[in-house]
Image: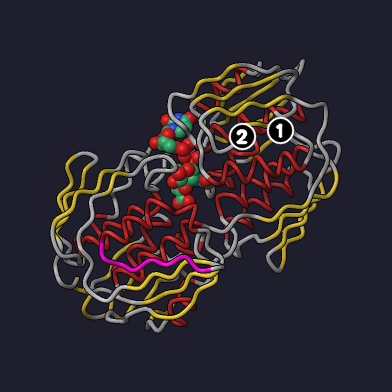
Amino acid sequence: MVARFRIVGGARLHGEVQISGAKNSALKLMAAALLAPGISTIRNVPDIADVDIMAELLTRLGCTVVHGAGEVKITVPEKLSHRAEYDLVRRMRASINVLGPLVARMKAAEVALPGGDAIGSRGLDFHIKGLEALGAQIHNEHGYVIATAPTGLSGAEIVLDFPSVGATENIMTAAVLAKGVTTIDNAAREPDIVDLGEFLIAMGAKIEGLGSPKITITGVKELSPTTHETIPDRIVAGTWAFAAAMTQGDITIRGANASHLEVPLEKLASAGAVVTTTTDGIRVHMENRPQAIDIATLPYPGFPTDLQPMVITLNAIAVGDAIVTENVFEGRFMFVNELIRLGAQINIDGHHAAIRGILRLSAAPVVATDIRAGAGLVLAGLVSDGITFVDDAFHVDRGYPNFAEQLQALGADVTRVE
Ligand code: EPU
């Protein structure tokens, strides 16, 4: 049975939430565990569907994966199989993160092409060019990327056209076992990249420049398994911060790392929120209706594209007009049509959205198109008059552990209905 969220509008969210590990780190750490035979343990893993999909993928590659209580233990054999099937890759794009580790360790990988999704076309060209520069031979066949490196990989100087998160990760997790030195220029700087790099360093890799636009990797012969704690999920934390501001509430977000959210928190302050950094998190408190805020999404440390639906929703009920520019994913305004069903006044022109704030939205049934759009629509339901239904709740489950329960604990009338 397909689940939907039922949201009664009107609550001012107040109380505390606890942030778990970052989805987009944990999944990459799990894939990188393939680089070392033995048992690697990843702690602070969120309780979300995508972690189960990655566990299934690693199991099919020959690993034994035990998952429970926020921890994943991966036993990696000496010999792995090297094919990531379409049925898993299509459900979760992060599956392509096994490409780099498999080519590096097994000298071969066959990974299904993920295809497009609801946020855009999302190419793989930077991943492929990077791995080719390291000496892999790559072609596409029957919907799969087939990569081989019969004589192993060698270091290279790689310049990315765009600081792609996934490409930086796949290149980094291949280069750690290549002969010689690899440099990645215009590398992604996201905290997830730093987390992955630190995991690799703990396994014995030699990496410098993490968090900067130039990463230097000196290949080593082999890596050893390790234990690592995932960083907190900055996008989930940011979602709660926006939820507090748009509902004129007061939320303490425990376990969040404010330094990963500098730009979003500054923007919330300019919307009128009182943002305080506490010893173990962030408190966002809002007394009045938010002021409209202009935003342009950019690679880290810029404003994250994953919080763009939250900022559009906030602007929909803010005082004044705003322009939100999406620079990372071409298709990420798709959910705006759903928001318009709730009465939001938004005009899209290419990758700009012009939003005129109104006092309240008006409840209606809408559909989640991806994880972040789904979360944004649930929050939109909270600032709507009446009862909103958000269909296809499974999208939200992929990124937000126990979202309805957490909203209830903050005083909202939100339930999941089957
Ligand atoms: N791109 C290319 N060619 C490539 C790689 C990327 O054209 O070879 C383009 C993409 O099409 C996109 C842009 O470059 O327009 C950025 O893509 P990037 O590779 O940086 O993103 P990603 O690795 O596919 C990750 C997160 C996304 C997050 C982005 C940006 C994971 C599993 N996904 O995607 O998270 O929005 O980085 O920060 O880590 C989400 O969690 O909801 C989500 C979509």
In this rendering, the answer to whether 165 lies above or below 406 is above
Which is nearer the N-term, disc 1 or disc 2? 1
Q: Nearer the viewer, residue 287 or 63?
A: 287
Along the horizontal axis of the image, is 271 left or right of 42? left
Q: Which residue is mark 1?
A: 102
Identify the residue at horizontal 51%, vertical 43% (top origin).
Answer: 190
276 magenta-colored: yes
Left or right: where 125 falls relative to 194: left
Say which residue label 2 marks.
Answer: 111
Which amino acid type is shown beneath numbered disc 2?
Val
**What's under tag 1, amino acid-wise?**
Leu
- Across and down, in percent, residue 213 comes to 51, 30
Residue 3 quadrant: bottom left
22 shown above or below 418 = above
Which residue is at a point 47% across and 61% down the rendered structure image? 236
Q: Between marks 1 and 2, how big is the CA–CA gap? A: 10 Å
